[in-house]
Amino acid sequence: MCRRWEPVRRFPFVLGEQMDLRQFYKKVREVESSLPEPYVMVTSLETSDGGRAGVVSEVAREVAAMLIVGGKAVLAAEAEVGSYRKAQADAKAAHEKAELAKHLQVTIISDAEGTLSTGKPAK
């Protein structure tokens, strides 16, 4: 069964069944030029194709502009950015600790005379 996609009507560049690509990419360029950093934090919005709302991601400026104009994401708030950075730092610390535990080396010293455990020579 073929599913027919409904046109997105909330954008001014959608005309009936077809999208005005010139207006779409003009808007993408405008949004892209307004973004200050080369990498931007965005928060996803719920979409009809299964997108989950509230997922924070760090993406390139070009990708962020496409997501924002396409209605799939918005710029992340400072609180969301802070919690994202903290979660990333915690995950990195946990990973580094796990890697260090994997490479922990133990040296076994044999004590033929028994001086190490008691501090006195064995009789």
Image (cartoon, grey):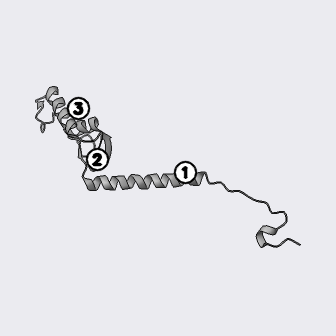
Establish if 93 lies above or below 63.
below
Tell me which residue sits at (12%, 37%) in the image: 9
Q: Is residue 76 left or right of residue 14?
A: right
Q: From the viewer's perspective, is the residue at label 3 or at label 1 nearer? A: 1
- Measure how far apart labels 2 and 1 are at the Cα level: 32 Å
Check disc 2 and give the amino acid type: Arg
Work out whether mark 2 precedes mark 1 in sequence or the reverse, and give the earlier one: 2
Distance (Cα) linking label 2 and label 3: 22 Å
Residue contact between numbered discs 3 and 1, judged by CB atoms under 8 Å: no
Under mark 3, the amino acid is Arg
Dot 1: what SS?
helix
Residue 84 versus residue 21: which sits nearer the camera? 84
Q: CA distance from mark 3 to mark 1?
A: 48 Å
Residue 79, percent from left and from top: 27, 56
**Crowd tier of the residue under label 2, counting other residues whose Cα lies within 10 Å: few below 14, some 14–19, many 20 or above:** few
Q: Earlier in the sequence, mark 3 or mark 1?
A: 3
Residue picked out by circle 2:
52
Q: Nearer the viewer, residue 6 or 98?
A: 98
Residue behind mark 3? 3
**Residue ID at (65%, 54%):** 105
Quarter of the image with the C terminus in it: bottom right
